[in-house]
Image (tube, rainbow, N blue to C red):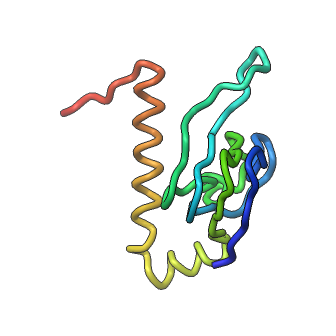
């Protein structure tokens, strides 16, 4: 996988931009933020080593849902659409971490908006 390097305060991805790849944090920490209706920055969280981000754009090709900014010198690996598609065909078990991230983020979002899942 290709590696990219970012200096502090550098935007890795920006909310609204089109994206067709995901990133895996190899070193450093990053901040995830979103612009709210009043045009103010709202910090959603922090990313650290082995965290993945940008996976929604990789899967659906829609604009980025948040901005990710390096907080310090960072190294990230790029997971391209081609590599993702290859994994789906040749090693689908390797996708489990991505799906776990998606599930955890969905649960967190539901909790933040006051929704709790019904347990049957």
* Outermost residue to the top: 38
* Outermost residue to the bottom: 90
- Vertical side of 43 occupied by 102: above or below: below
Q: Residue at (63%, 69%) from the top-left corner?
A: 77
Does the rendering let one see residue 63?
no
| Number of numbered discs overlaid on the protein picture | 0
Q: Residue at (43%, 29%) from the top-left corner?
A: 110
Q: Residue at (63%, 41%) from the top-left corner?
A: 31
Residue 117 x/y as whole percent:
31, 29
Residue 69 x/y as whole percent:
71, 45
Q: Looking at the rendering, which quadrant does residue 81 occupy?
A: bottom right
Identify the image quadrant of the C terminus.
Answer: top left
Q: Is residue 50 left or right of residue 61?
A: left
Residue 17 x/y as whole percent:
81, 47
Q: Nearer the viewer, residue 87 or 15?
A: 15
Q: Residue at (43%, 73%) from the top-left corner?
A: 94
Identify the image quadrant of the N terminus.
Answer: bottom right
Residue 67 x/y as whole percent:
71, 41
Does the rendering let one see residue 54?
yes
């Amino acid at each position: 996988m290709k590696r990219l390097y970012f200096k502090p305060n550098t935007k890795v991805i920006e909310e609204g931009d089109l994206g067709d790849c995901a990133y895996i944090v190899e070193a450093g920490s990053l901040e995830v933020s979103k612009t709210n209706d009043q045009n103010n920055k709202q910090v959603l969280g922090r990313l650290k080593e082995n965290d993945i981000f940008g996976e929604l754009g990789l899967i659906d090709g829609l604009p980025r849902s948040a901005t990710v900014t390096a907080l310090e010198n960072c190294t990230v690996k790029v997971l391209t659409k081609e590599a993702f598609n290859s994994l789906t065909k040749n090693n689908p078990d390797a996708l489990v971490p991505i799906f776990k991230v998606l599930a955890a983020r969905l649960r967190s979002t539901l909790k933040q908006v006051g929704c709790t899942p019904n347990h049957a």
